[in-house]
Amino acid sequence: MSNTLIPNIATHPGEVLKDELNARDIKQKDFAAQISMQPTMLNEIINGKRPITADIAILFEKALDIPANFWMNFQVQYELDNARIKERNIQKLQLIEQWQLIQQYVPLKYFSKFGYLTNNVSEDIVKVKQIYQVNRIDELVDSFASFKSLTPSYYRKSDKLQIDEVNMFGWSSLVMWRAKTEKGKAFDPNKLVELKNGLHSIFFRNLNSRELTKELLSEFGIKLIFQGKFEKTPVDGFSFWSEENPAIGLTLRHSRIDNFAFTIFHELGHIYHHLQKDKSSQFMDLEKTDNSLKSKIEKEADSFAQTNLIDEEQWNELISMVPLNENTLIAFSKKHKINPAIVLGRVCFEMKNYAIKTSIDKSLN
């Protein structure tokens, strides 16, 4: 990029001529007569309406003892400055047009909140292109249309959810861009049992769970991105293929160990059962709504999460315990090394009763 300074206004050599004549106390009409030039022509030069040619530069050299090269160089510089000013103004207009389009399709408030924008329009346009992985800003229109066609339709049928599709588009694009910048180990789909056991251990202890889960998934070739939620983006999890690896994005909008564990396994369900078959797919786990509105694929991911957190044999054992109260839940939890909040969450879900009084800590630690 050129470091040439561009003036706000280009200076015509006629202005220098005017100053020179004034300094020498020479009237314009007298100078015009001296160099055999029409006064109107000289006036046009002085007022920047006519260029200084080589012939005129030689006349000025002889009359004022100022080299012809000076006048010619000044004229060339004037024309270059004008061209650069015009180019800069065109670039400014292009930036304005691009920024107007960005305002329609990019959640600038949240990109700024999370530190991805600098308030320098030129730099921010480059960053937006990177995040949305487009070469030109006008490609955002097609990208947004593609996003809408890929995202689940059931949330549009629910009166419970408030969705801002621009925010959803921005959040998912940000997660995919961040995942692309991370390098993952080779993904081996045959190590699910080892991964499951490692996750159970982390969730049971529930100490530094976020970081340990990210490290463990990375060891098994799965990228995990934590990205705070945007307004009207009721997303729990998001799974997709990133370069050579599967990836999961989480908002952690519910900072609970049971929600965290379920969402991780839900997205793993998509990875192991769906994404491996079609790496171009994307799955977004939205706030739970009417189960009848969910697709078969989403129900499969839910089932994967349930059975890998508490398998059928364990569940049958649990519901046979009488009375089913906090003490029996904790006893079951210790026996099978399953976090009691996860056990409680499953019981509340199956019994459709989320008001069970208990001292069990659900916090994600």
Image (spheres, grey):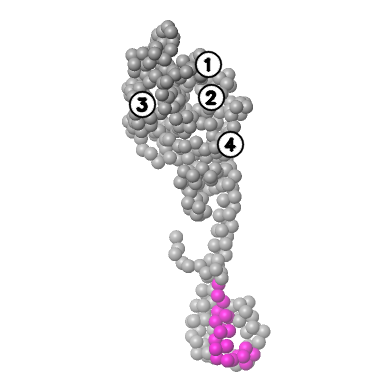
Q: Are marks 1 and 2 in contact (CB under 8 Å)?
A: no
Between marks 4 and 2, how big is the CA–CA gap?
A: 17 Å
Q: Residue at x 35, y 22 (%)?
A: 204
* Circle 1 SS class: loop
* Circle 3 SS class: loop
- In terms of sequence position, does the residue under pointer 1 or pointer 2 come before the other? 2
| Residue 20, quarter of the rendered image | bottom right
Q: Where does label 4 land, which residue?
A: 164
Q: Where does label 1 land, which residue?
A: 352
Compared to residue 326, the image places residue 40 above or below, namely: below
Q: Position of residue 303 (x, y in %)?
A: 47, 18
- In terms of sequence position, does the residue under pointer 3 or pointer 2 come before the other? 3
Magenta-span inclusion, residue 133: no
Between marks 4 and 1, how big is the CA–CA gap?
A: 29 Å
Between marks 3 and 2, how big is the CA–CA gap?
A: 24 Å
Q: Is residue 186 among the parts visible in the rendering?
A: no
Q: Where does label 3 land, which residue?
A: 206
Q: Position of residue 262 (x, y in %)?
A: 44, 23
Tag 4: amino acid: Asp
Magenta-span inclusion, residue 14: yes
Between marks 3 and 1, how big is the CA–CA gap?
A: 25 Å
Q: Residue at x 41, y 28 (%)?
A: 364
Which of labels 1 and 2 is toward the front? Answer: 1
Q: Principal SS element in the magenta part?
A: helix
- Between 325 and 364, the residue placed more toward the observer is 325
Tag 2: amino acid: Lys
Between marks 1 and 2, how big is the CA–CA gap?
A: 13 Å
Residue 288 tag number: 2
* Crowdedness near tag 4: few (<14), some (14–19) or many (≥20) residues, C-alpha within 10 Å: some
